[in-house]
Image (spheres, rainbow, N blue to C red):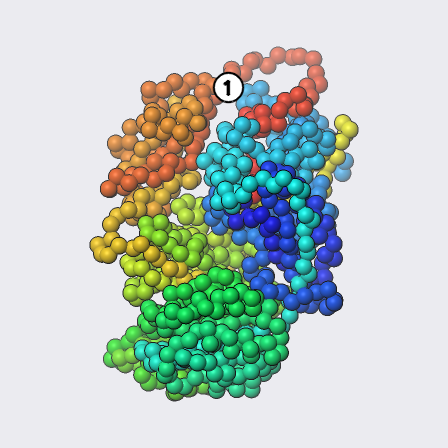
Amino acid sequence: MSGCKQGLPIPLRLTPALFCVRPLVDMVTQASPYLFEATGKRFYFKNVAILIPEKWKTKPEYMRPKLETYKNADVLVAEPNPPGNDDPYTEQMGNCGEKGERIHFTPDFITGKKLPQYGPQDITGKNVIKKCQGGSCVTKSCKVDRVTGLFEKGCEFLPDREQTEKASIMFSPSVNSVVEFCTEKNHNKEAPNLQNQRCNLRSTWEVISGSEDFKKTTPMTTPPPKPTFSLLQIGQRIVCLVLDKSGSMKSGDRLKRMNQAGKLFLLQTVEQGSWVGMVMFDSAAQVQSELVQINGGAKRDALIRKLPTAASGGTSICSGLRSAFTVIRKKYPTDGAEIVLLTDGEDTSISTCFTEVKQSRAIIHTVALGPDAAKELEELSKMTGGLQTYASDQAQNNGLIDAFGALSSGNGAVSQRSIQLESTGVTLQASQWMNGTVIVDSTVGNDTLFLITWTIQPPQILLWDPSGKKQGGFVVDTDTKMAYLPIPGTAKVGIWNYSLQASSQTLTLTVTTRASSATLPPVTVTSKMNKDKGKFPSPMVVYAKVHQGALPILGASVTALIESAKGKTVTLELLDNGAGADATKDDGIYSRYFTAYDTNGRYSVKVRALGGVNAARRRVMPQQNGAMYIPGWIENGEVKWNPPRPEMNKNDLQGKQVCFSRTSSGGSFVASNVPKAPIPDLFPPCQITDLKAKLQGDNRINLTWTAPGDDYDYGRAYKYIIGISTSILDLRDKFNESVQVNTTNLIPKEANSEEVFVFKPESIPFENGTDLFIAVQAVDKVNLMSEISNIARVSLFIPPQTPPETPSPSLPCPEINVNSTIPGIHILKIMWKWLGELQLSVALG
């Protein structure tokens, strides 16, 4: 619920030529009053924007998008990948209560073709098994093992078609009777599901009512209006560069570096068919180029020649923006147009054009260059949905080129977007070499460009393709201090080697490309921070999503380089281990906490991902934040099986090895409240979120978890406190009063290592039938304590002695019928007792 607002507008992404828009309209129209009642008459869908693909036939009712883009859509509708996997799910980078990235639907799900397979999984029904032999199948009641108390392998729970229970929406939303979320009163806190593990045993309603959005609302006294739908069709991209040429741009070779980045954008980043204009400004604005359509190299070269060559004067950002609006309006409305604004200067009057910016409905991407760029710059990106970036004066970090390289279209096809394979730099001393490799994998290679920059004089440039053939023909621009080589056709797959030699200067190398095919999704890396602003000592979280289409890339080496306004760079290894800042293991989203603040101001973020012998593309994406598949139904006492779900085998999970290299700009954030050095230690260890417990022998308990650090997930904690209780709520709410395990010999390992600890419960009864709950707390060297871990559970069950086998008459197995006289929440508990583990898929957030 976090991020949901009263009268919430939801942009939806559609995939071309799959189905008409009507099913979407019907679905949202029906969902709005349902949401309204379920949230205590607080929330409903007011405005819904549906993005129509550019390739669809144009209709008079289709309008041009304003701030809506595919990249920031809340709901995406696309063909399943792999085919047949129609599971609806929520993409969730953060933790419980945080806003998810987006919801994923497939066309068959939207049109209702998969409704029977994604209905309820609780309430009432029967436990049955389908046994097939010789082409015929028979359905029987499940047998129960009298020793273990578990059902036989292959047993399925099939719900009754007609139900009476009202909860819970997050578990079984398609049951007609279900109209409520689980509350504190009826939530099963002992169920071994993700809701309890991630949300500290809280019900969905507790999470919702604790959100800031909920706290700002009160129940309405009148019914909500029906949603208003806007059909928006993606058109040609419209971009206007607004570039600072004030006197401060002379400092640190900033004008040259701006032109290097601008040249890369015009040469390669901006897509074919786009309309591009250019404005430069100092204390006043000057139009360098009206909108021209990029339809070949001549138009790109003509725009490059318009880049400013001299710096002087003051800084008037609003003058530049107003001129850009004028340039765009000569040909198109400003709705949905993009402005790339770069400045290095202070401007106290920037807020005077905020109203005009909002009214324009243009998207403004901001590039702050150097430590003195206007403090209000990020407000322009925030109010328009644009990207905010920061580049320091450290040329070797290549920040300016990275910022412009990230500005590919938010609405264009993935196959047309520019992809950065490499971005690196170094300051060389006398006649030193800068050597390295770049991997071109099979998913990319079209429109590949190698670009080198320098600060004093051209270096010696050597480049070899994977076959060992030396490449020549670099275009050298001594005025802009750069050289570039476009690779004709599709670049050869494999390892490209380069060697650059220079003396006493800084060199950078950037390699960009595009997908090798319109039908084969490229490996992509997208990165972001959890917030635009960080206030010390609150940590920031950096995320990197490494995928090929919808499939995650596992085992990649992913690092984040975070540079402060002082020029200090911190390197973080990002992890996909389901611990610390990482919410879900093996989902292709790599995460890490950032606590290494050293000053107030802007910080830039860059992510590097490498795939080698340990990296693999998972062929199937098992969704944890999605709807559970229903194998069948009980209707009028008759078993009706649904079509079998596509099977997931071990090979699908292991995936195929993939080698690649990628770099990606993660934008920037602004830090505040950072004290002067020495920075005090105010960061506790992070919460342990993957604690597991199992019995070892008759009376010992084996615990495993991922080690936290001294500062969140960095360093080494000082000690652990382990508490045990027979009451799950007492352990959560009164951890300090729980029975504590002796951990004298438990020495914490380095963060992100696996911890294993075996102990025998003492000072607490642990006998047959006992449920024991365990939690762990980490403590650092200055006695700062982590939050209590997720709560693990072990149950001591001593099976009865098996009676000797004696001949007996054959009797039918008694039918086990979970009927409607048992409340649904208790059925969940019973099912867990029988099955040992009931996996519940919950869309959190």
Location of residue 813 with respect to 686 vertically, above or below: above
Q: Measured along the vertical axis of the image, is residue 625 above or below residue 703?
A: below
- Tell whether 265 sits left or right of 670: right
Please name whichever residue, 223 or 711, is drawn nearer the observer in this view of the structure: 223
Which residue does the image show at 58% across and 54% down from the upper left?
74
Tell me which amino acid carries mark 1: Pro
Decide which of 790, 11 is in the foreground and name it: 11
10 Å neighbourhood of mark 1: few (<14), some, or many (≥20)? few
**798, above or below 84, in the image:** above
Residue 612, quarter of the rendered image? bottom left
Q: Can residue 726 be seen from the camera position used here? A: yes
Question: Which quadrant, please, contains the N terminus?
Answer: top right
Occupied quadrant, residue 58: bottom right
Q: Residue 143: percent from the left, percent from the top?
A: 64, 24
Residue 580 coordinates in the image, percent (x, y) = 39, 46
Q: Is residue 180 left or right of residue 729?
A: right
- Residue at 36% in and 50% down: 539
Please indicate whether residue 289 sits to the left or right of residue 132 in the image: left
Q: Residue at x 63, y 39 (%)?
A: 221
x, y percent for residue 516: 57, 70
Instruction: Give the number of marks.
Output: 1
Relative to 563, does residue 800 appear above or below in the rendering? Answer: above
Q: Is residue 265 visible?
A: no
- For this orientation, the residue located farthest to the left is 678
- Name the residue at 29% across, 55% down: 674
Disc 1 secondary structure class:
loop
Q: Report the residue marked by disc 1.
A: 799
Horizontal and vertical percent for residue 126? 68, 27
